[in-house]
Amino acid sequence: MDAADTEDTAADTAADDGNTLPLDDLRTFAEVFGRIKSDYVEDVEDRELLASAIRGMLGGLDPHSSYLDPDAYRELRVGTTGEFGGLGIEVGLEDGFVKVIAPIDDTPAARAGIRAGDLIVRIDGKPVKGLSLSEAVTMMRGKPGSEIELTVVREGEGNPLQVSIVRDVIKVASVKSRTLDPGYGYLRVSNFQAGTTEDLLEAVAELKSDNSDGLKGVVLDLRNNPGGVLNAAVGVSDAFLDSGLIVYTQGRDEDNKLEFKAGPDDVLDGAPLAVLVNSGSASASEIVAGALQDQGRAVIMGEKTFGKGSVQTIVPIDDRTALKLTTARYYTPSGRSIQALGIEPDIELVRGTVALEEDSAVAPLKEADLMRHLEDPENGEATAEDDQDSDAPLVAEDYQLAEALNVLKGLNLFRGAAAKRE
């Protein structure tokens, strides 16, 4: 065996060993790198070529692993604090196009009518096909006040839609709250940021102060919530649980095998909880929904969720760049993987609206309209207007939310009946 044969054998052995570098493939990489430097029609800087190679490596793994250049890394760090520039949409790649996971509440994208599931095929007339996710996101970013036009393909629409959006600085309040009916509260979590748990606890305290007789039930709205910080999802789940497992993760490295458990004290003291989800509920939202469903703490209502059951770790390379790398899968307390499956609601609610019947020109005849009708001795003269509510009912505003409120009221009736039997 001559020296050349020995070298080839060593190279083959190195390529077959999972712990050593594949020398033949590295030679190929060096050959391609050199050929681009010498023969490509335009001169390309070494740094740009290497960055493209890194992006290509990560792009071949899964849709959520990526290379964060200085701009993307800065936007990520700012985004987790709740203020960032852009359109206000969480996006991913699907078949080479940018897919909207969810629009964020009260942002330019949401106001323009962008929906979860929309495919963005053109940005300002330029095709998206072939671009990396980071390149497409960079095209959508820009100076606040500037306009951008998206070409969107939407299921059920025969032709692509042209949507014009004015860019803005996005300031996201992750938690909103209000009272739906006396004793029944509403909590909306639009995404999971570093301070979401604290914001939610403050919102619950406000609801309690607004309802002096106590909370009989709460609707937790996670529709179109694209996810966010894992610890925030754990904290929100913990707020409604007093014990038990919330979520656990499993990865190749022992450091990525973690369990998160609930501590004592349920902020609602056991009051019924309904959680609204849809196809735009992803990642951290699914952790919360899965934990509360497996623990039997909440009724999950709405549509099947997005199905993102992986954990991304930010690995800094230096002060300016980083890798966003998928390092683990997460599982609900019962051992369910959400990845590509999603959370199935306990009660399925289709997306829809309820149209109220227009007032008739002729009002229906009532007792109070009859001649010589008897009056209520305590309340005096009754009129037909007394029976009319000036506010539109909740079902016309949000059908799914109205159904969730009805379920909470039904649960309270059932609990009251059960207590009487005991």
Image: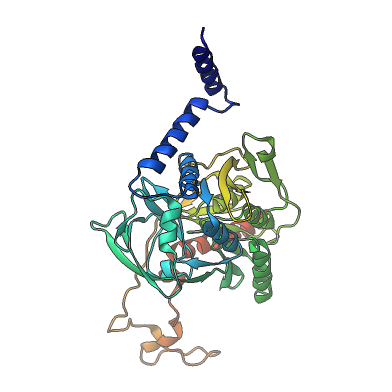
x and y percentages locating residue 1 in the rendered image: 51, 7
Give the total number of marks visible in the rendering.
0
Q: Residue furthest top?
A: 1
Q: Nearer the viewer, residue 382 or 400?
A: 400
Q: Is residue 113 visible?
A: yes
Q: Is residue 279 visible?
A: no
Q: Is residue 326 above or below residue 182?
A: above
Residue 291 relative to residue 304: left or right = right
x and y percentages locating residue 275 in the rendered image: 55, 57
Residue at 69% x, 75% y is 209
Residue at 44% x, 58% y is 137
Q: Residue furthest left?
A: 158
Q: Nearer the viewer, residue 331 or 321?
A: 321
x and y percentages locating residue 368 in the rendered image: 40, 87
Answer with the quarter of the image where residue 360 lies.
Answer: bottom left
Q: Nearer the viewer, residue 205 or 95?
A: 95
Answer with the quarter of the image where residue 418 lies.
Answer: bottom right
Q: Is residue 335 above or below residue 96?
A: above
Q: Is residue 144 above or below residue 137?
A: below
Residue at 52% x, 48% y is 67
Q: Residue furthest right?
A: 264
Residue at 72% x, 52% y is 242
What colouring style does the render use?
Answer: rainbow
x and y percentages locating residue 396 in the rendered image: 41, 70
